[in-house]
Image (cartoon, rainbow, N blue to C red):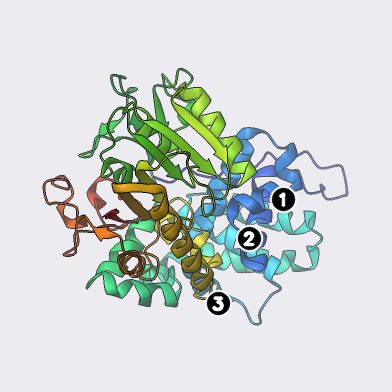
């Protein structure tokens, strides 16, 4: 269930003059985020980091803003359609963003109408868009009165997915694009992976793959055992590539493009000697922070380009979770739906081929490689698996026994393909593709 977004308390008015707009960091930060995504095609986290309001806000206000912005993005196609008949002409994009924030609160976040309308009007005044305050007041009052009736006649699932993505997902099977859209439409729960022997914090449900799932909105830092490194955050689908590499104690293994470190931790707890390679300095800092909390001493972190780095001796196994469009993570990052474009795939697939070639040359003969992407795109999954074969890597298909807990994710070729339409009754999962190879 969505958490209502509450309005700040209004100040007492002085006699004969209106009260100035009150600070409202939640909506100010959400506005900054959405303008970054919609106007500048910046990812949500990047837009959040650029928000001056976010840097001075309390953690709870930043978290609430993140959830408000994500909810707006999750329903953005629907929100645009609902607003359209109430607008006589196209407003400036920042004004439309503010209207969508108000509309999302009214239709999806259970915010009382007076609060949704009033806070949107105040937001426009704070952002020097006061000439549009009357428009917002009138439009949002109409949405409050008629919006639910408008929703009943809309195909929300279809509206909330850009047309190019919906079309591209049709190759996954009949009805799959709609199932994915339904999976994306709800805020994702929190999944954790336990260290061997650790006890799961209370309140979770154990999933068929062994992950433990908690309700959406759960704060991981509040779970017992977090500070002690008893577990790490990792979507259930994200656990599968490392699991399917079958790393053994003492093996020499590399996790290429390793941050934030969940898969690195999976490899390390087997007792393998793990090299975690990450080129981005900010992501490397996050990787080191996560590994330090987990106290995993058998991991060597190296800031390097995985496309040129070479191990001292050939490796037994490699996990390559390659940079990708990340369309499979839209449950948690709905901004990817509106930031990514088809033309992005050309650069991404070239980078994936470069990393596959490099990974092949790091392996000993007989060494294993799992290639994975958190993408739903054909170009980044099956097409790259075929490219790996053309490079001389030998397919090593996943067996039905290996995926007995999720048989629908095994393709006829023996690849792994998950998507947000799977495990709908359990809260869904992220979209991943993975394929396994042997170096001859």
Where residue 238 appears, as percent x and y from the top left, is 35, 46
Q: Nearer the viewer, mark 3 or mark 2?
A: 2
Q: Earlier in the sequence, mark 3 or mark 2?
A: 2
Which disc is residue 163 wearing?
none
User: Which residue occupies the extreme bottom position in the image?
Assistant: 89
Q: Secondary structure at mark 2?
A: loop
200 lies above or below 10: above
Which disc is residue 84 wearing?
3
268 lies above or below 27: above
The residue tagged 1 is 50
Q: Find out whether the residues at labels 3 and 2 contact each other: C-beta distance under 8 Å.
A: no
The residue tagged 2 is 42
96 lies above or below 298: below
Nearer-the-camera pick, 242 or 219: 242
Residue located at (79% from left, 68% from top): 131
Q: To which quarter of the image does residue 13 belong?
A: top right
Q: Is residue 152 visible?
A: yes
Where residue 353 appears, as percent x and y from the top left, is 44, 64
Q: Nearer the viewer, mark 1 or mark 3?
A: 1
Crowding at dot 1, Cα within 10 Å, few <14 / some 14-19 / many 20+, comes out as some
Where residue 384 appears, as percent x and y from the top left, is 36, 66
């Amino acid at each position: 269930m969505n958490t209502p977004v509450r309005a700040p308390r209004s100040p007492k008015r002085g006699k004969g003059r209106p009260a100035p707009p009150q600070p409202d960091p939640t909506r100010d930060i959400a506005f900054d985020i959405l303008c970054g995504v919609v106007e500048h095609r910046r990812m949500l986290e990047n837009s959040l980091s650029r928000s001056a309001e976010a840097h001075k806000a309390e953690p709870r206000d930043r978290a609430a803003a993140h959830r408000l912005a994500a909810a707006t993005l999750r329903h953005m196609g629907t929100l645009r359609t609902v607003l359209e008949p109430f607008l006589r002409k196209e407003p400036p994009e920042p004004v439309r963003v503010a209207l969508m924030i108000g509309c999302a609160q009214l239709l999806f976040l259970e915010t009382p109408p007076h609060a949704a309308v009033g806070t949107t009007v105040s937001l426009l005044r704070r952002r020097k868009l006061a000439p549009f305050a009357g428009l917002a007041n009138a439009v949002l009052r109409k949405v409050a009165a008629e919006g639910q009736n408008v929703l009943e006649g809309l195909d929300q699932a279809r509206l909330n997915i850009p047309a190019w993505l919906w079309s591209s997902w049709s190759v996954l099977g009949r009805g799959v694009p709609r199932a994915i859209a339904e999976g994306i439409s709800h805020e994702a729960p929190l999944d954790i992976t336990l260290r061997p022997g650790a006890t799961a914090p209370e309140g979770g449900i154990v999933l068929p793959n062994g992950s433990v799932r908690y309700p959406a909105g759960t704060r991981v830092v509040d779970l017992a055992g977090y500070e002690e490194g008893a577990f790490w955050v990792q979507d259930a689908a994200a656990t599968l590539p490392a699991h399917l590499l079958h790393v053994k104690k003492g093996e020499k293994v590399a996790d290429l493009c390793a941050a934030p470190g969940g898969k690195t931790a999976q490899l390390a707890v087997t007792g393998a000697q793990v090299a975690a390679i990450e080129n981005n300095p900010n992501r490397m800092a996050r990787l080191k922070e996560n590994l330090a909390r987990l106290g995993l001493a058998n991991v060597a972190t190296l800031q390097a380009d995985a496309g040129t780095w070479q191990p001292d001796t050939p490796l037994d196994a490699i996990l390559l979770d390659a940079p990708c469009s990340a369309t499979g993570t839209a449950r948690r990052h709905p901004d990817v739906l509106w930031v990514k474009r088809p033309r992005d795939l050309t650069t991404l697939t070239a980078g994936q081929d470069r990393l596959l070639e490099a990974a092949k040359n790091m392996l000993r003969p007989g060494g294993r490689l799992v290639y994975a992407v958190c993408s739903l795109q054909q170009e980044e999954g099956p097409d790259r698996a075929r490219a790996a074969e053309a490079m001389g890597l030998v397919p090593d298909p996943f067996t039905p026994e290996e995926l007995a807990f999720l048989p629908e994710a095994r393709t006829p070729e023996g690849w792994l393909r998950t998507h947000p339409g799977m495990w709908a009754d359990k809260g869904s999962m992220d979209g991943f593709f993975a394929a396994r190879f042997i170096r001859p």
